[in-house]
Amino acid sequence: MILNRLTSRNDQEEWLRIRKSYLTGTDAGAVCGMNPYKSAMQVYLDKISPEIKITDNEVMRLGRDLEDYVAGRFAEATGKKVRKSNAMYVSGEHPFMMANVDRLVVGERAGLECKTASPYTADRWKDGNVPEWYYLQCQHYMKVLEMDRWYLAVLIFGKGFRYTCLERDEEMLNDLVSIERDFWENHVQAKVLPSPDGSKNADELIQKYFRRKEGTVTRMTGMDEQISRRNELVGLIKKMQAEQKIIDQELKIYLGNAEAQIGISDRYRVTWTEYETRRIDTERLKKEQPEIYENYSKVQKSSRLNIHAA
């Protein structure tokens, strides 16, 4: 197995530039459609764009600053010795696959991935489970470095520290390599945009990169089937929403007749509670305090897709 040592993270701009030429462990889940925070479209647009965008936020900084702490907790809990690995490794067998790893485990064919997580996502880590995109990230690393296992340690803020051992899964790796190769060859290298996946991330990317020119008209070919299916779905959704509303009303009548706020069946617990919300009367504010309205107004651009019969 050939491992190519390219560079460290000391030069962040160069590090980001090199990553554009490969699929990384953090790309794996998105390419497979398993990452709710990153879509295949985003990976594609990042790879083909010459722009080097350095982004940072509080969550990313916490992850960096606490990486040493998480690694230390893992070593303390397991008795294993770990060492940093700042190199960028490229698979000799699959040269489109690259890996940046947090730690290597001394004396084992294994590595360690360090994570931090919000307490609101604690259920994702319950009973030794890990989020699917992190599982794929670790399998990707095992393929690139030809390792037998990968440890995943997470600090869940306010909830505690957990770690698990992920064994190499050859069947999974065969599928993962096939998906990544297809994405790299038939999308990135061929400059073919992946299909959208319906995610919010895809919405934002389409809004950003596929802007419309006002007043222009284009002849659409090969899209009638999709438009017809969309219209069918709109009708089906309306029908299902109406059916849901009827059931909601029936439940409220049932609880109302019983003079109860809570209903319990063999399988469900239903509550019907009142609550108050407070909203700003924007029309009144605009009329009576126009300067305040103007100072605190924020323009947000959006788009709407309308379909009419020809």
Image (cartoon, rainbow, N blue to C red):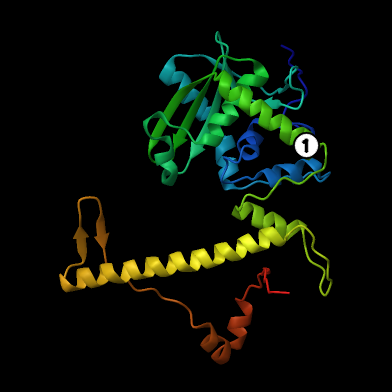
Residue 155's place in the image compared with 42, above or below, is above
Mark 1 crowd level (few <14, some 14–19, many ≥20, 10 Å Cα): some
Spot occupied by residue 67 in the image (x, y as percentages of width and height): 55, 31
Residue beneath the point at 32% across and 66% down: 247
Residue 134 appears left or right of 187 = left
Name the one closer to the observer, 157 or 207.
Answer: 207
Residue 292 appears left or right of 75 = right
- Residue bearing the label numbered 1: 186
Residue beneath the point at 74% across and 43% down: 44
Residue 98 appears left or right of 64 = right
Q: Residue furthest top?
A: 107
Spot occupied by residue 202 in the image (x, y as percentages of width and height): 65, 53
Spot occupied by residue 259 in the image (x, y as percentages of width and height): 16, 71
Residue beneath the point at 49% across and 83% down: 281
Quadrant in the rendering for residue 305: bottom right
Residue 309's place in the image compared with 76, above or below, is below
| Residue 41 in sight here | yes
Q: Secondary structure at mark 1?
A: helix
Spot occupied by residue 265 in the image (x, y as percentages of width and height): 20, 55
| Residue 15 in sight here | no
Residue 303's place in the image compared with 108, above or below, is below
